[in-house]
Amino acid sequence: MAWREIIYQYDGSFEGLLCCVFESYTKKERPTAILRDGDDEPSLFEIRAVTTDRAHAQRIYRSLYKRSPEVGSFLRRAFLTCLPDKEMAIYRFIVKFYREGAPLLSRLSDDTYLPLLKAVRQLSGEVEQFRGFTRFSDFDGVLGAEIEPKNRVLPVLRRHFCERYHNETFFLYDRTHREALLYSGGVSRIVPLNHFEMAQPDEVEAGYRRLWRRFYDTVAIEARKNEKLRMTHMPKRYWGMMTEFQDESYFKARPKETPSASPAPGAPAAIPAPATRPEGAPPAPASAP
């Protein structure tokens, strides 16, 4: 039986993508493209919206898990990457994985596996960098920071910062993907935030910022200065969000009589912070690993 060609459109979630896989197999269709809601591409093929159904997503996820417990977390991370046309790349991998099973994961040069593997490794490397290069400021008792990643790293960074600052209230804003990680009182949430501008610091916070830059400048040894080596260990694309590389306006305190122009995002709703997943049964599919 010939497979029908079509274009799927989904809601942009990991569950929604798994539902596209479910739709493909149950209706004997082979998508030529998988678009997110709002994407508008001219095409000769029919475009059909795929409804996200948690039961369908679970069915696909568990079938993958039975073949290899490792593949679920790998695909969730692949979904967070900035790999071009990642939906089709993930779809093609799943199709091949259903045919060949777990041995596919040992063939590192496979043309469907390798692009995803490289993208996931880039994501993991970026996550490690942000664990060390993220700079928080204090805004009236709320810690806040901004990052500008290539990949959607907040779901992966979530556990690290929630555990590290478990007694604090904080937010971490992703400028690239316009979303924020909010945490307060053991509760965390990742929310879309299209318009956000960090407020100026008060006198105390501005003072701490100046101290940090002074420390950074003081410990540097001029005779051993090596710009190439520094950019190897601290890539330049991260400098824009790091306190020690900012211009003088970053260290200027707001006037005392002027309220904060952009208040910190509100505390998240009652969604538990990440906890260690019990061993055994696979987790439910989600955008966050």
Image: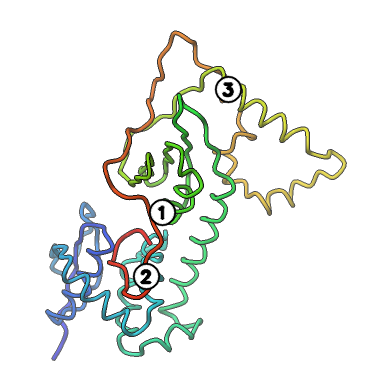
**Crowd band around label 3 with a 10 angstrom C-alpha radius: few (<14), some (14–19), many (20+):** some
User: Is 237 or 289 nearer to us in this picture?
Assistant: 289
Circle 2 sits in a helix, a strand or a loop, which is it? helix
Residue for point 79% across, 38% down: 220
Cα distance in 3D space between marks 2 and 1: 14 Å
Mark 1 = which residue?
152
Mark 2 = which residue?
75
Residue for point 42% across, 60% down: 81
**Depth-wise, is mark 3 or mark 2 nearer the camera?**
3
**Depth-wise, is mark 1 or mark 3 nearer the camera?**
3
Residue 59: name its quadrant. Answer: bottom left
Q: Earlier in the sequence, mark 2 or mark 1?
A: 2
Amino acid type indicated by mark 1: Arg
Residue for point 39% across, 20% down: 261
Where is residue 272? Give x, y as percent. 32, 50
Cα distance in 3D space between marks 1 and 3: 30 Å
Mark 3 = which residue?
206
Residue for point 83% across, 40% down: 221
Circle 1 sits in a helix, a strand or a loop, which is it? loop
**Crowd band around label 2 with a 10 angstrom C-alpha radius: few (<14), some (14–19), many (20+):** many
